[in-house]
Image (cartoon, helix red, strand yellow):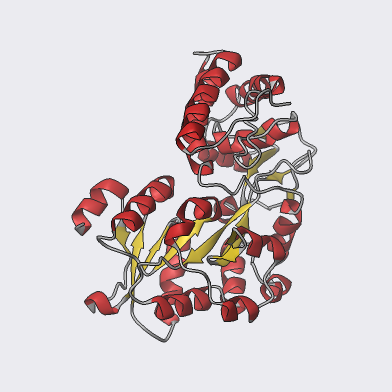
């Protein structure tokens, strides 16, 4: 597949400082945002070793694009930076992490767990994230973006959850799910509709707090806001996740790719990234040296729970997000919208050979 086709499909762009040495360079594909990409490029420029060619993929399309690329083999990257939620779906295309790289560092337990599927570590954890309260947790004006990911804490707080393929529990067919969606729609209908607008409203003093993740801290600090973080009000509801570096089985430079992954997750690098972007480190050494905001974020995320580790999980949001938007817009009731999600998830489960447990609690 040519680069021009990749650009058209996936909004892929090579970073500055890309190598011109053709196939000899390590091919690194990532889903970083603008500020992270700048820091990555600076980190690579300062690194001694093999040339690295950097390709950026839009995060929203990352799972789909990588599934297509790794399956086709036309142009295989050597190293990927992926969301931990995608690991189960991509695991059969990824190499196991060398045991020496896992053993040589004291990884934060929840971070290493996110990089592990079916008992095998298939990546080196790069950061921990999830949803927290940013701002005054006692305030009444709280901004929440209209998005399925942000709905998860409210669904969990009501006593339901997203589809768990391992148990066959749909979650969304629970009667309390509709109540949770009504409450979420009422909250978000009256406030900023996007994460960007919510952040701007917090900076302007129009909100007391927002539900966001560590990725929002840099922009808020740049805008001059003093940052305070707290756990979500109900323990166990935040969808704790993270990011990791993984090496595809089809990589032509496996050893060099793992070395690059080790370099990019080295404690001193994690500390620099934490100081610059409030990244939550994944090693004990880096966490100890990280700024207070990173440790506060780690503490706030401690009670969260990862999304189900199953190949089906990333696809669930394709149906849940538009259903939530329809309820917020007043185009459907919560019962109608969730009934549609239930039908879609049942069809998805059938394609994956998953047995559904009837009558979710």
- Height in image: 213 above or below 205? below
Identity of the residue drawn at 53% across and 72% down: 97
Residue 151 image-quadrant placement = top right
**Is 266 on the left or on the right of 43, as rendered?**
right
Check the picture and name the quadrant holding the C terminus. top right
Q: Position of residue 320 (x, y in %)?
A: 52, 29
Residue placed most toward the observer, 3 or 313: 313
Q: Position of residue 324 (x, y in %)?
A: 54, 25
Residue 53 image-quadrant placement = bottom left
Evaluate whether residue 142 shows in this view: yes
Residue placed most toward the observer, 32 or 108: 108
Q: Position of residue 222 (x, y in %)?
A: 55, 55
Q: How many marks?
A: 0
Identity of the residue drawn at 55% across and 73% down: 265
| Residue extending farthest bottom | 48
- Height in image: 79 above or below 24? above
């Amino acid at each position: 597949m040519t680069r021009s086709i990749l650009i058209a499909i996936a909004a892929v762009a090579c970073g500055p400082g890309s190598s011109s040495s053709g196939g000899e360079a390590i091919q690194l594909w990532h889903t970083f945002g603008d500020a992270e990409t700048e820091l990555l490029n600076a980190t690579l420029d300062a690194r001694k070793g093999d040339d690295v060619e950097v390709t950026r993929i839009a995060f929203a399309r990352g799972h789909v694009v990588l599934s297509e690329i790794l399956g086709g083999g036309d142009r295989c990257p050597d190293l990927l930076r992926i969301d931990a939620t995608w690991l189960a779906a991509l695991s059969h295309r990824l190499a196991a992490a060398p045991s020496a790289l896992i053993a040589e560092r004291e990884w934060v337990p929840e971070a290493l767990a996110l990089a592990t599927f079916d008992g095998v570590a298939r990546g080196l954890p790069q950061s921990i994230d999830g949803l927290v309260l940013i701002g005054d947790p006692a305030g009444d004006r709280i901004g929440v973006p209209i998005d399925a990911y942000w709905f998860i804490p409210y669904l969990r707080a009501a006593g339901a959850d997203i589809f768990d393929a391992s148990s066959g529990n749909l979650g969304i067919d629970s009667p309390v799910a509709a109540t949770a969606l009504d409450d979420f729609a009422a909250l978000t209908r009256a406030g900023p509709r996007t994460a960007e607008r919510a952040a701007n409203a917090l900076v302007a003093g129009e909100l007391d707090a927002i539900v966001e993740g560590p990725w929002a801290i840099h922009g808020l600090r740049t805008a001059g806001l003093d940052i305070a973080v707290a756990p979500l009000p109900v323990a166990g509801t935040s969808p704790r996740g993270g990011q990791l570096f993984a090496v595809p089985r089809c990589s032509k430079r496996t050893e060099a790719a793992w070395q690059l992954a080790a370099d990019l997750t080295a404690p001193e690098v994690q500390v620099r990234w934490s100081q610059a972007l409030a990244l939550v480190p994944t090693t004990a050494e880096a966490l100890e040296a990280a700024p207070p905001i990173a440790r506060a974020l780690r503490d706030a995320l401690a009670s969260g729970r990862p999304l189900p580790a199953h190949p089906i999980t990333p696809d669930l949001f394709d149906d849940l997000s538009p259903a939530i938007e329809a309820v917020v817009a007043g185009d459907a009731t919560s019962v109608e919208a969730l009934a549609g999600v239930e039908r879609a998830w049942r069809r998805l489960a059938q394609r994956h050979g998953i047995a559904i447990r009837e009558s979710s609690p």
